Amino acid sequence: MTTQPILEVSDLSVSFPSEAGVVQAVRKLSYSVYPGESLAIVGESGSGKSVSSLAVMGLLPDSARISGSIKLQGEELLTKTDAQLSKLRGKTVSMVFQDPLSALTPVYRIGEQIAETIMIHKGSSKADAEKRAVELLDAVGIPNAALRAKSYPHEFSGGMRQRAMIAMAIANDPDLIIADEPTTALDVTIQAQVMDLLETAQEVTGAATVLITHDLGVVSGFADRVMVMYAGKAVEFGDVDSIYADPRMPYTKGLLASVPRIDATEKSPLTPIEGTPPSLIRLPQGCPFAARCPIATELCRTVEPDLEPTNVEGNFAACHHSNELRAGEEIFPLPELAETHIHTPREERDVVLELDQLERVYPLTKGALVKRRVGEVRAVDGVTLDLREGETLALVGGVGLGQDHHDHGNHEARQAAGGLDSHRRPRRRHVVAP
């Protein structure tokens, strides 16, 4: 990178006092994020991902003990007061929280909350800020934005609340967006929509993005670089493509092996990383991952490795054996793979799901005591399709066009796709809802 980093974290350590002892939540963490870049921070729960991001935002409690350096556009944040940080939060750096329902204020309307951040940081009038809030809600895909801006958070679905949070995060064109597990509570379809929205927001604002997640599937399609954390430290860092193709830290290999495979047999169990993460109050001697690592040696159990360069250019790993691992070498057991049917002609494969002139009509009634029918809503109108073994069917269309009424069909499609070879893209069919 030839430009200066937007965010530069150096030797960041965060600890919390407790009755059992000092919790070492983050230990000597260093990384940089550059303009327009997407950095993903991944790891199991308790690895220090969220604590490190809250330290950047200045949102940790007073009991936290923080050392090291956090620079935003060259300015040291750890020496700033909360009042000084408040001028940066929402303007220069913004955050999309994991649970939007608890992040949004329940007694204020959605539009009011977005408008407030615009008025505070840009000095806009209330009318202009509310108009801008509607534009932002429309930009993030909220239908009938002018009407929904008057809704309260509990009147939005989980996906819509997350969209509103993203609208608030990009309202003042920040230089850095931190997204803390923004898709955790969402279903797979909404997850994809939210990640597409974050990517669009990054392109529109030109902001750098730090994505905190445990979903490696999300990382592969979004981030430029990835940092893997374990027991409060970075244990692997580098380019996404090279780390996914040739990880040099056994923990990273375990995370990748634990991702469900579409080509596994129907009842094949997932591949776990045996054991549990160590206590951050009493860390073991040596590498914290040694007790769970299938290739650990006596050296691993006595000396903790530093994050050092690997023989993959630009990548770093904290493992004594990082340069001994071969590309494609599996050190965790793989699930039993299903027989592929990708070469069988479609006409010869069994039909898994078939719809013939499917209709779903909702009557519209009027009256309290005596109801009378005044019309109808045709949610699904004469849909005919079939789905065959080994096939993935995509139902495409805008909000309210009837795709959700095929939920059972989507589930069948995912089940039927279990016989596909993960190294080949399946034949896909697309149905566009008119």
Image (cartoon, rainbow, N blue to C red):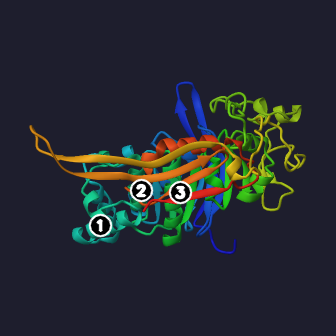
Q: Residues within 10 Å of mark 2 (few under 14, many from 20)?
A: many
Callout 2: SS: helix
Q: Residue 270, percent across and down?
A: 69, 34
First in sequence, mark 2 or 3: give its number: 2
Q: Residue 351, percent across and down?
A: 61, 43
Amino acid type of the residue that numbered disc 3 sits on in the rendered structure: Met
Q: Which mark is residue 119?
A: 1
Q: Nearer the viewer, residue 235 or 293?
A: 293
Q: Residue at x 67, y 32 (%)?
A: 277
Q: Residue at x 63, y 39 (%)?
A: 44
* Circles 1, 3 touching at the beta carbon (< 8 Å): no
Callout 3: SS: helix
Q: Which mark is residue 163?
A: 2
* Circles 2, 3 touching at the beta carbon (< 8 Å): no
Separation of marks 2 and 3 at Cα, in angstroms: 10 Å
Q: Residue 54, percent across and down?
A: 50, 49
Callout 1: SS: helix
Q: Quadrant of the N terminus?
A: bottom right
Is 370 placed above or below 401 here?
above
In this orientation, does residue 4 appear? yes
Separation of marks 1 and 3 at Cα, in angstroms: 27 Å
Q: Residues within 10 Å of mark 1 (few under 14, many from 20)?
A: some
Nearer the observer: mark 1 or 3; the answer is 3
First in sequence, mark 1 or 3: give its number: 1
Q: Residue 251, percent across and down?
A: 74, 41
Amino acid type of the residue that numbered disc 1 sits on in the rendered structure: Met
Amino acid type of the residue that numbered disc 2 sits on in the rendered structure: Arg
Residue bearing the label numbered 3: 195
Nearer the observer: mark 2 or 1; the answer is 2
